[in-house]
Amino acid sequence: VKITPAHDPNDYGVWERNPEIGLINVLDPDGTLNEEAGSYAGLDRFAARKQVVADLDAQGLLERVEDREVEIGHSDRSKTPIEPYLSKQWFVRMGDVEGGVLCGRGTDKQFTAPGLAQAAIDAAIGDWRSATGLKLDFHPDRERYRTGYVAWLAEKRDWCISRQLWWGHRIAVWWKAFEADEHAALADAAGKLPAGEQIHCWISDKEGAQHDLAAGLELAQSKPELAPFELQACLRDEAADAAHGAALEALGLERDPDVLDTWFSSALWPFSTLGWPNPAEAPIEPGQRKLDGALDFYYPGSCLVTSRDILTLWVARMVIMGLYDLGDLPFTDVFLHCKILDGKGQTMSKSKGNGVDPLDIIEQYGTDALRYVICDMQTGTQDARLPVQADCPSCGKEVELAEAKNGRTIFTYLCTHCGGEFDLLGTLDDVPDAKAKAERFNDGKRFCNKLWNFARFTLMNLSEGLGCQALEVAELAPEDRWILSRLSQTIRAVDRYLGEYNPSAAQRAARDFFWNELCDWYAEMVKPRTRDEVQRPVAEQVLAAVLDQVLRLVHPFMPFVSEAIWEQLNASAPQRGIEQPFPSAQLLVHARWPVANAAWEDEGLEAEVARLQEAVGKLRDIRSKYNVPPKKKLPGAIKTSGEALDSLKRLSGHVSNLAGLAKLEIGEDPARPDNAGAAVVGELELFLGEVLDPAKERKRLEKEREKLGKQIAGSEKKLGNERFVAKAPPEVVESERAKLEELKGQLAALEQNLAALG
């Protein structure tokens, strides 16, 4: 069995369990083979592989050569094959430690955990809570993300924190290696090391085990086979570096050339930005506010919002660092949003050149449109695709970037229509620029325009010096009571969705209320009252109050447009409210969040208006079906009975206004207008006069009667089958009977329509 622990991660794991098999590294850092490779030493690894095959063939040992497809890891940036290489790295121990790990050392939140990984696990599951009573939670799918978080930490693999890069935070460790015969030099250097709380020194053997100075010197003398021994020193901060760095270098110690893993320094972000470890002495930039008290005030935080793909890379490590350094969680709730993918389903990335510059989107669609659409795309645990286009500067046609090939760089594309090359980032002087766009952002732009238009409608209907009278909700017009009821229900829905960490659903609830109910229905219902001197004051007060609450609701999703409208609303109606004025604010960003009002909610009235909407919708459908101009007034009639009859009579004025009727008769047997088109919805039969060609309508109705007759015959046959009635589930049989009755009712109405045609 071939096994290469120094060149394969899986084989390395075998060596960790069976160290007696040894480690043989045949590579140098530059990818050439070292002396362990014998006659192949000095060859590049790719050349050596070809040479091995050639040598086997020359000796007659090569049976055959086959093409095989295997998965080979490639660097995300350079796209070159990854070569596993045995090297010395720095690690943070994640596993349990004998005696435990002291977290929050020196703070009033100090506690002992079995190990760093276990501390982070306990933060999410089990009974453990921090000294301040905090526990870690995940949204929007608690079980999914918590399970992944715990499973990754439960492996308790040590964290490699060193990177061989030119940039980054350099590891603050100085070290020097001593061979077995250099014990005296090791002891001399150890004795001359600086002392104090700002420097920590130890001796490490060739297997990586660390020992304090006394134990390390004794081990170096008693077990020289563990050489080389490294004398290592770690400095606490820049002040310690300035005080002791030169002394360490004078002893021959060199600072480690590696830099910290970016996630190590990023893991410190929740508290390093607040001046930790000493906010009072933290350096600040010119004009920056001092950080005194910032750490105590802002740490722990509450909610972290981040992408789901860095749950382990960043979130888990921030939890570890926060617990270890301060003894408390950096946040209690983690909201993991989706990733935005390009049109091909690939992650948008600067290195791939497939991203979108937000400034381009803002320039074309607006800042709020960008924010609105990005929020709308947050669909829980599913990633979202964002197809991106650009207008070719050569031919002017739109190009889908997912379908276009790259030009000379990853930031240039070839037009799929004319073949011309264009540059999205202006990287090449001789290639014309083009700006990326995404049609989906038009949705946000349309909503911005709708909000502006409704605000303009409201403001133009507000009287100068409009006050805020104490209104009795029960005495308001039905449309006013209805919109207030729907507003309160919407506030509840938005609150619920935000509490569930579902901002897209919250935004949709606010949008649907504003667009589908406030604009499409209430604005049309209230228009006649804005032209009536008697009814106008109450109508405009309700309009202003509802706009006030809508602006508060949509502000988190569209802050700039809503803030601009708020300023105008403050100027036109400084005080707004219904029973009493709402809490006011000069800036919307400082305004109180709206509160649902149970006294406004009226489910019965909402049902009545829903029936009105159905009736008006069907009358509009008839008008559209027969191509009747929108402004032409026509006679109408509605046949119904019982509570529906009473309800529609109360709202008949709105039915006439919204459906464009010259007159409307509602009753149990109203006179049908001449040449009327008909429709049925629920318990309502609706007629719109002067729209029919009688001959054509008779032909259509006879065809529909034939169709209904066949459906009724089929249903009666099924119900007449004793086996069906006996063996089918009772609810299925009952459903079929209800269906038959409905079909018969439709047929009876159709027969009446035929009779009315004469």
Image: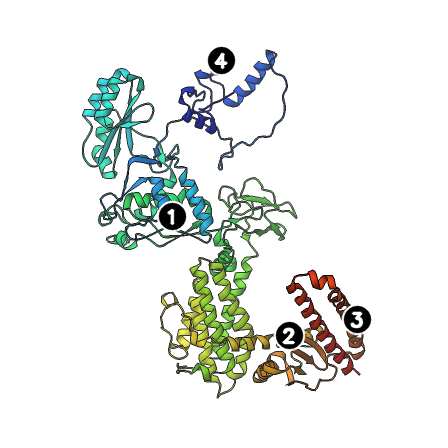
Disc 3: which residue: 706
Q: Distance between the residues labelled 1 and 2?
A: 52 Å
- The tag earlier along the polypeptide, 4 or 2, is 4
Residue denoted by label 4:
39
Q: Earlier in the sequence, mark 3 or mark 1?
A: 1
What's the residue type where badge 1 is placed?
Ala
Question: In the displayed structure, does residue 329 sit left or right of residue 455?
Answer: left
Please state which of residues 511 and 117 is positioned toward the viewer in this rendering: 117
Q: Nearer the viewer, mark 1 or mark 4?
A: 1
Circle 2: element type: loop
- The reply to whether the C-beta atoms of the residues labelled 3 and 4 are less than 8 Å apart is no
Q: Where is residue 464 in the image (x, y as percent from the top left)?
A: 42, 82
**Which comes before the other along the chain, label 1 or label 4?**
4
Q: How many marks?
A: 4
Badge 1 marks a residue whose secondary structure is: helix
- What residue would you read off at disc 2? 682
Disc 2 marks a residue whose amino acid type is Gly
